């Protein structure tokens, strides 16, 4: 068997087959003419050509706007988008998300670095990944992903808060040095969580956790009070996004340490991912339950206020006791909506038959009426 190789990093063919291919840019239609000799007679882009051209192994297809894709299933942190944006500093391997493949392992000091490329300076930008957090809060900010050439650079920046496992997302603007918010969702320890940072038009920033649009926490509003159950997008009235020429760092950066964690399936797009696109990436977050089935109705509200909040969503209702028992409490705990020992949880549960609701028992019935303020959840009809 004759093996003909193409240098996919530099887009150059080796000398043995250079004469058999005509130049053609990636993404254009390409034909294959084996000719009488059986060799590849036309350019088919960066590919592997075997058996005198009778078999061609092309690159994987790439979705629209995909700038970089790091699966971490190789030992070089290669970019599998076909754009050749490979990591300069390579992290060691860890267990992957799902039954197959690997992830990148970080310990707070190990850093992955991807050199700057101009397409990252886009006002439409999405960064998504799976994270498995191994370390609790350390009383200091910790970098998950950040692009920076100086300590002031924050476009984009995804961090952890010093005293909580909530996300801290930032970007730099012309009006102020940084702008952004903290998440309502709390990352659990030792559980895979999907995160997506979506910048649209340089004027709106949305955070998704496990495919669910998060509620921005800004300033003294430490619990997302007043945020609708469908989540919210953070927008600012003044100032343009300021990009920088620094490298993209994962697991820490030159100005801030990281944390102990695994990262897998890191994707960067030059377009704002739609909510359905994020849901497709995060669909296995609560497997086999879909992230579409439940939303946070309120952090603290009465039963009447919860009914109104769920009614504002299409096809949602206050969660029944059976729904919470079946899947809801699992989602609520994974999202950090319910924290601490289960005996201390206080939430609304619509009970159609008290004899079938085993969540609270008699203690729930005696704990108060519908005017009590508790955490509330909305479930899909």
Image (spheres, grey):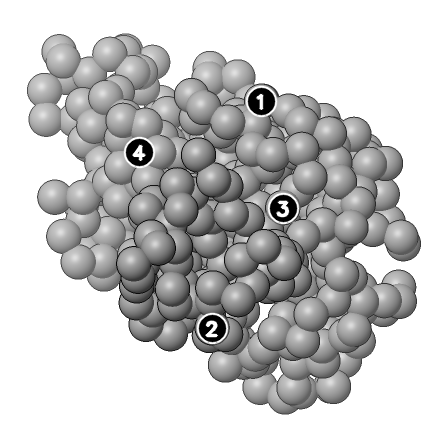
* Badge 1 element: strand
In the rendered image, the vertical position of residue 192 relative to residue 307, given as above or below:
above
Labels 1 & 3 near each other (Cβ < 8 A): no
Question: Which quadrant would residue 330 be assigned to in this image?
Answer: top left
Q: Residue at x 79, y 29 (%)?
A: 107
Name which of mark 1 and mark 3 comes first in the sequence.
3
User: Which residue in the protein does label 1 denote?
Assistant: 95
Q: Residue 346, how many percent across, how many down? A: 42, 28
Q: What mark, if any, has residue 348 been given in the picture?
A: 4
Q: Is 70 left, or right, of 374 in this rendering?
A: right
Labels 3 & 4 near each other (Cβ < 8 A): no
Q: Residue at x 65, y 86 (%)?
A: 240
Q: Residue 45, how many percent across, how many down? A: 45, 63
Q: Residue 81, how many percent across, how many down? A: 50, 55
The residue carrying pointer 3 sits among few (fewer than 14), some (14 to 19) or many (20 or more) residues within 10 Å by Cα, namely many
In the rendered image, the vertical position of residue 347 relative to residue 77, given as above or below:
above
Q: Residue at x 53, y 58 (%)?
A: 17
Disc nearest the viewer among 3 and 2: 2
Closer to us: 223 or 130: 130
Q: Report the residue that reaches farthest toward the front.
A: 36
Q: What mark, if any, has residue 22 been given in the picture?
A: 2
Gap in angstroms between the C-alphas marked 4 and 1: 38 Å
The residue carrying pointer 1 sits among few (fewer than 14), some (14 to 19) or many (20 or more) residues within 10 Å by Cα, namely some
Gap in angstroms between the C-alphas marked 1 and 2: 42 Å
Gap in angstroms between the C-alphas marked 1 and 3: 17 Å
Gap in angstroms between the C-alphas marked 2 and 4: 67 Å
User: Which residue in the protein does label 3 denote?
Assistant: 78
Name which of mark 4 and mark 1 comes first in the sequence.
1
In the rendered image, the vertical position of residue 66 relative to residue 238, given as above or below:
above
Q: For the N terminus, give its image quadrant.
A: top left
Question: Which quadrant would residue 177 be assigned to in this image?
Answer: bottom right
Gap in angstroms between the C-alphas marked 3 and 2: 26 Å
């Amino acid at each position: 068997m004759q093996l003909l190789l193409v240098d996919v990093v530099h887009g150059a063919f080796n000398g043995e087959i250079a004469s058999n291919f005509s130049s053609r840019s990636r993404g254009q239609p390409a034909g294959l003419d084996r000719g009488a000799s059986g060799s590849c007679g036309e350019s088919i882009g960066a590919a592997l050509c075997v058996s005198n051209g009778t078999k061609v192994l092309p690159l994987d297809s790439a979705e629209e706007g995909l700038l970089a894709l790091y699966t971490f299933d190789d030992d070089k942190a290669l970019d599998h988008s076909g754009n050749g944006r490979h990591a300069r500093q390579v992290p060691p391997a860890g267990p992957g998300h799902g039954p197959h493949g690997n992830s990148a392992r970080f310990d707070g000091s190990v850093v992955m670095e991807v050199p700057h490329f101009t397409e990252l300076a886009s006002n439409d930008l999405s960064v998504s990944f799976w994270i498995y957090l191994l370390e609790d809060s350390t009383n200091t900010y910790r970098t998950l992903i950040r692009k920076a050439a100086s300590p002031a650079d924050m476009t984009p920046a995804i961090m952890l808060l010093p005293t909580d496992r909530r996300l801290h997302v930032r970007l730099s603007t012309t009006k102020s040095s940084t702008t952004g918010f903290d998440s309502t969702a709390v990352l659990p320890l030792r559980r895979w969580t999907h995160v997506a940072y979506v910048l649209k038009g340089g004027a709106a920033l949305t955070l998704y956790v496990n495919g669910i649009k998060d509620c921005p926490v800004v300033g003294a509003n430490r619990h997302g009070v007043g945020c609708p159950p469908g989540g919210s997008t953070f927008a600012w009235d003044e100032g343009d996004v300021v990009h920088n020429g620094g490298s993209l760092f994962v697991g820490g950066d030159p100005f801030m340490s990281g944390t102990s964690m695994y990262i897998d399936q890191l994707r960067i797009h030059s377009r704002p991912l739609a909510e359905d696109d994020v849901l497709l990436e995060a669909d296995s977050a609560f497997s086999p339950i879909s992230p579409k089935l439940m939303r946070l109705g309120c952090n603290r509200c009465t039963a009447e206020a919860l009914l109104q909040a769920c009614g504002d969503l299409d096809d949602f209702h206050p969660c029944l006791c059976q729904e919470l028992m079946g899947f809801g409490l699992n989602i609520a705990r994974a999202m950090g909506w319910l924290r601490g020992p289960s005996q201390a949880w206080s939430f609304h549960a619509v009970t159609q038959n008290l004899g079938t609701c085993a969540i609270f028992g008699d203690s729930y019935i005696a704990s108060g009426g519908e005017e009590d303020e508790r955490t509330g959840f909305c479930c899909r009809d």
